């Protein structure tokens, strides 16, 4: 790959600017979930072990370019110190000379990069200032890599740069799933609406062998084929778009898998009375809320023969039982195949992570990305500025 890792850098005695994502949830001034902080620890410890001095850069919330007390990174300090098992020096306005005089073994956390409008504007003056504070730049914030900001992109162009461990892990997993995958590749794309996933579907049909379309968005594809989906969630105005995706898939030799049977209810409610019917037998007052067992059996057959799976979006209204059945069944099967060493499985996106956790399948997936926007842009085939900048130097 075009980017360097910590293994390629001589860090001894060097000040290493590390862009991390510690944008953690907070209630009443206390961090309620330390996952993001915990995941940066291997990178910080590696830098220390190699004799470097980590200077952490991060954003926190959306202060819109000015200091906001509730969005000070100071709030994260106790959790960060607990995760690292050492004290961390917090600096509000960093000064290169102060940082130079810190003893080896120190870790520095710099105040919220978004307290100035120069960060999100990717102002060259801010990038140059940040670059003056360090000798090496290390980006460990994949989840912020879809934004070209001073601390994610500008500074990377001014210093010798590398990926941190978390970024490296994420990029390697994503490369295995879509960059250079073992075939056949299956993509599962579900969720509420086609309109939010148009670029993603357009990119995937050119890259994968089978594309399972599920959830509310499958209804739009069914309706585009003159099937009456009753009161189901459906974007009728996107019928032409759906048809053009189907045509593009046909040209590319990608099999589109739509529901072969559907679970229908009259209300969007847990435990609602439901029927399983053919997609063209939905009553006028019926709502499709899940894929049926025949569909699940066919997806199972396709997964059995697959080498790679990439997944974004649930196959049904997974939050309300029993309409989580198709999502659970496919998730469990993918997890079992992965555990048996037969499948590389990569999934991402907020609802997807929740659905796979609910199915108890997440721990066995090869990689679960928590990167939200960056993961989706990567699935859409877009270049992520933070990753592209790493590839320069
Ligand atoms: P997304 O954020 O686009 O991944 O969509 C996830 C949401 O889609 C979840 O809240 C699901 O409940 C919802 N969803 C999935 N299938 C359906 C369906 N058939 N009808 C209505 N909502 C659905």
Image: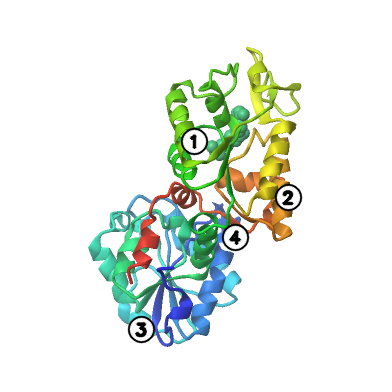
Q: Quadrant of residue 149?
A: bottom left
Q: Residue at 57% x, 57% y: name it.
A: 182
User: What is the C-alpha distance between the residues marked 4 and 2?
Assistant: 18 Å
In percent of width and height, residue 215 lies at 60, 33
Residue 180, compared with residue 355, is above or below; it is below
Identify the residue shown where x is 47% and y is 66%: 140
**Rendered image quadrant of residue 67:** bottom left
Element carrying mark 4: helix
In the image: residue 339, left or right of residue 208: right
C-beta proximity under 8 Å, tags 1 and 2: no
- What x and y, as percent, mark residue 1? 44, 68
Per the model, the C-alpha gap separating discs 2 and 3 is 48 Å
Mark 3 against mark 1, which lies toward the viewer?
A: 1
Quadrant in which the C terminus is drawn: bottom left
**Residue farthest along the left direction in this orientation:** 125
Whether the residues at callouts 2 and 3 have beta carbons within 8 Å, the answer is no
Which residue matches tag 4? 35
Give the residue number, with chain letter if any, for mark 1: 250
Q: Are there few (<14), some (14-19), or many (20+) residues within 10 Å of tag 4?
A: few
Q: Which mark is residue 115?
A: none
- Choose the circle earlier in sequence order: 3 or 4: 4
Structural distance between the alpha carbons of marks 3 and 4: 30 Å
Q: Would residue 146 appear left or right of 284 to someone viewing this image?
A: left
């Amino acid at each position: 790959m075009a980017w360097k890792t910590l293994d390629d850098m001589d860090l001894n005695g060097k000040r290493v600017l590390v862009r991390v994502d510690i944008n953690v949830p907070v209630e009443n001034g206390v961090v309620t979930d330390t996952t993001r902080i915990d995941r940066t620890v291997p990178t910080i410890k590696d830098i220390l072990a190699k004799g470097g001095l980590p200077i952490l850069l991060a954003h926190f919330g959306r202060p819109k370019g000015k200091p906001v007390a509730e969005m000070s990174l100071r709030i994260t300090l106790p959790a960060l110190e607990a995760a690292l098992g050492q004290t961390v020096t917090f600096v509000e306005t960093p000064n290169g000379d102060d940082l130079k005089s810190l003893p080896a073994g120190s870790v520095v956390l710099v105040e919220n990069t978004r307290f100035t409008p120069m960060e999100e504007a990717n102002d060259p003056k801010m990038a140059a200032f940040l670059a003056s504070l360090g000798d090496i730049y290390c980006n460990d914030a994949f989840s912020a890599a879809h934004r070209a900001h001073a601390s994610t992109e500008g500074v990377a162009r001014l210093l010798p740069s590398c990926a941190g461990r978390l970024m490296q892990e994420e990029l390697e997993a994503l490369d295995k799933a879509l960059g250079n995958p073992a075939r056949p590749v299956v993509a599962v794309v579900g969720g509420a609406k086609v309109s939010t996933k148009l670029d993603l579907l357009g990119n995937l049909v050119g890259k994968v062998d089978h594309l399972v379309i599920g959830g509310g968005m499958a209804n739009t594809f069914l309706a585009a084929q003159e099937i009456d989906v009753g009161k189901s969630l459906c974007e009728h105005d996107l019928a032409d778009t759906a048809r053009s995706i189907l045509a593009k898939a046909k040209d590319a030799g990608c099999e589109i898998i739509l529901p072969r049977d559907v679970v229908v209810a009259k209300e969007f409610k847990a435990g609602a009375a439901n029927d399983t019917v053919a997609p063209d037998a939905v009553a006028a007052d019926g709502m499709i809320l899940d894929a049926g067992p025949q569909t699940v059996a066919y997806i199972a057959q396709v997964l059995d023969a697959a080498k790679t799976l990439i997944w974004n979006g649930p196959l049904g209204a997974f939050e309300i039982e029993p309409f989580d059945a198709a999502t659970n069944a496919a998730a469990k099967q993918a997890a079992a195949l992965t555990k048996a060493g037969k499948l590389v499985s990569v999934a991402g996106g907020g609802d997807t992570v929740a659905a796979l956790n609910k199915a108890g399948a997440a721990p066995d997936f090869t990689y679960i990305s928590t990167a939200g926007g960056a993961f989706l842009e990567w699935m859409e085939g877009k270049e992520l500025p933070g990753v592209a900048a790493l590839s320069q130097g």
